[in-house]
Amino acid sequence: MPLQVPGSAALDLAAIYRKRTHRKQAALLLMATALLCSMMLDLAVGPAGYFLADIVHALIAPASSPPEVRAILWTIRMPTALMAGVVGASLAVAGAQMQTVLANPLASPFTLGISAAAGFGAAIALAFGVAIVPAFLEYVVPLNALLMALLAAGLIHAFSLQRGATTESIVLLGIALVFSFNAFLTLVQFFASEQAVAAVVFWTMGSLTKVTWVKLGISTAVLAGVLPVFVRRAWSLTRLRLGEDKASSLGVNVRHLKLETMALVALLAAVPVAFVGTIGFVGLVGPHIARLLIGEDQRFFLPASALCGAVLLSASSILSKTLIPGTLLPIGIVTAIIGVPFFLLLILRSVRTRP
């Protein structure tokens, strides 16, 4: 016999649901506003500092703005600021969905070795010109990174399907992948020329200085292509947080969902890493901030993760230009400075919550 809910109680539940939905929408609007402000500040900050009014004028009426402002804004700073947002959103969404399908709060492309695998793939192209598959010269680095990231994601997914695989064992596998690919990367540096080593080291630090409109377009296209798939799977991914058995009983094809998600996660993680280098902890920190603000409902958690990741990397871009006056720090160093304390906090929190 179906459960009968009194009319007044149903109205109260509906009011509570609407209130929570409005609160989540307000949080998303606040994050979007923060991202817009951060990007505007990123456009203004640099060796040649400008007032925000000058930036707004150059954006609204570029023809009437000074030529040097227009050149610096549209040629150098605009693609860099937009790329920070796109890369941050991509890494955060990838981390959010890895945490969802693996049921692991410490999962991210960086901590589970996907970024390290992409780094190794890119390094053999930078150092030796080795292409895993034939490609145009300018696309060898990103294609190598993508294929190695897919390999790492496939290993993690295959291991997670094994009987007896636990959250702890998946984390250990990820740590093993990180050390393995970092060892391979060091081996590449050992045999490479000095010039190639310099290129690999600079790339592994992560940098937005070599961003172009073409690279921005490719990264944006990948993010725009993957996000709708996750949006269509929002209810299934939300149910997966209840546990695989519960999700299966609710009609979710868990095996197919996890395989599809891990493949898309590898794509999201590899393309930005191939263009801007290794950037850690955004995929870990961004989803946790979004989860604290929004909750697990993928309809809101997914855009919140993307916005949090974009804000984090945009703010890191600003800090990379202002922490040491006159010096542009690699952005990967800045994200590590921000992310390591948060990572330690998560570990301590997990230890304290254990029975």
Image (tube, helix red, strand yellow):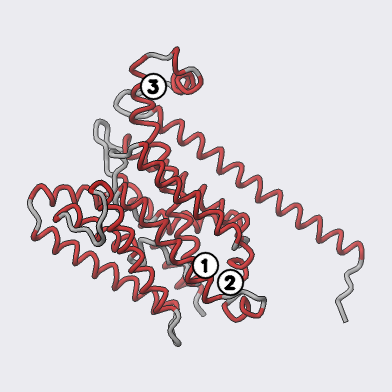
Q: Amino acid at mark 1?
A: Thr
Q: Amino acid at mark 3?
A: Tyr
The residue labelled by disc 1 is 100
Q: Which mark is residue 303?
A: none
The 10 Å Cα crowd at callout 3, few under 14, some 14 to 19, many 20 or more, is some
Q: Position of residue 195 (x, y in %)?
A: 10, 47
Disc 2 to disc 1, C-alpha distance? 7 Å
Q: Residue at 92% across / 63% down in the picture? A: 7
* Residues at circles 2 and 1 in contact by the CB criterion of under 8 Å: yes
Q: Position of residue 78 (x, y in %)?
A: 40, 32
Is 107 or 185 nearer to us in this picture?
Answer: 185
Between discs 2 and 3, the one toward the N terminus: 3
Task: Classify mark 3: helix, strand or loop.
Answer: loop
Q: Which mark is residue 240?
A: 2
The answer to which image quadrant residue 49 occupies is: top left
Disc 1 to disc 3, C-alpha distance? 42 Å
Is 299 or 167 nearer to us in this picture?
Answer: 299
The answer to which image quadrant residue 251 occupies is: bottom right
Residue 315 seen anywhere in this rendered image of the structure: no
